[in-house]
Image (spheres, rainbow, N blue to C red):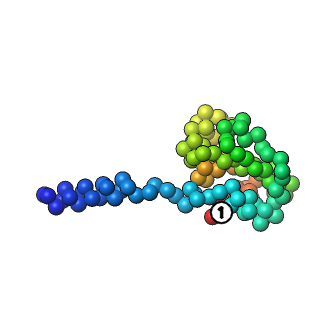
Amino acid sequence: MLILSLILTISIVFVGCSSGSSPDDSLTMENFTKAYTDAGAELKEEKPLFSMIEAKDGVMVYLNNSPVKLYEYASASEIESVKKENELIKDWPSRGKFLLETSKQEAIDIFNKVE
């Protein structure tokens, strides 16, 4: 009985102390902008109105003359919180702390493939 409780305690400690990070946690705005420019998108100096959806930063690129807007938040949980409050953005794709605004499937595919 003592050995079983010791194994259970050690298992709980390892699970509790393991990092809950995902591969998306290491993504940066540079990763995304590079992926889009490598795909032929043009990076614009103009910024989307990122503060209107409570993002901390935003970048706009044009892929085949269509705007693609990337928004950066402090965390993935912040995106989920903002999505619950804002019906307009609830279906926009997100990865880690980044949110994508586009109507083009090609742009969504690029967003999902960024490493």
Image x and y of residue 71, in percent: 69, 47
Image x and y of residue 75, in percent: 57, 46
Instruction: Please tell me which residue is depicted at 20% across the width and 58% down the height of the picture.
Output: 6
Q: Which quadrant would residue 109 be assigned to in this image?
A: bottom right
Task: Say left or right for 51 vs 8.
Answer: right
Q: Which quadrant would the N terminus be assigned to in this image?
A: bottom left
Q: Which quadrant would the C terminus be assigned to in this image?
A: bottom right
Q: Which quadrant would residue 38 be assigned to in this image?
A: bottom right
Task: Say left or right for 91 vs 18.
Answer: right
Instruction: Please tell me which residue is depicted at 82% across the width and 64% down the height of the picture.
Output: 40
Image x and y of residue 9, in percent: 25, 55
- Determine the secondary structure under disc 1: helix
Q: Nearer the viewer, residue 79 or 16?
A: 16
Q: Residue furthest bottom?
A: 38
Task: Say left or right for 47 vs 79.
Answer: right
Asked if residue 105 is positioned above or below residue 55 in the image, the reply reads below
Q: Nearer the viewer, residue 20 or 85?
A: 20
Instruction: Please tell me which residue is depicted at 29% across the width and 58% down the height of the picture.
Output: 11
Q: Residues within 10 Å of mark 1 (few under 14, many from 20)?
A: few
Instruction: Please tell me which residue is depicted at 78% across the width and 62% down the height of the picture.
Output: 37
Q: Residue furthest top?
A: 85
Q: Nearer the viewer, residue 10 or 36?
A: 10
Q: Residue furthest left?
A: 1
Q: Which quadrant would residue 51 be assigned to in this image?
A: top right
Image x and y of residue 52, in percent: 72, 35
* Residue on which the image places disc 1: 113
Amino acid type for the residue under numbered disc 1: Lys
Q: Is residue 31 visible?
A: yes
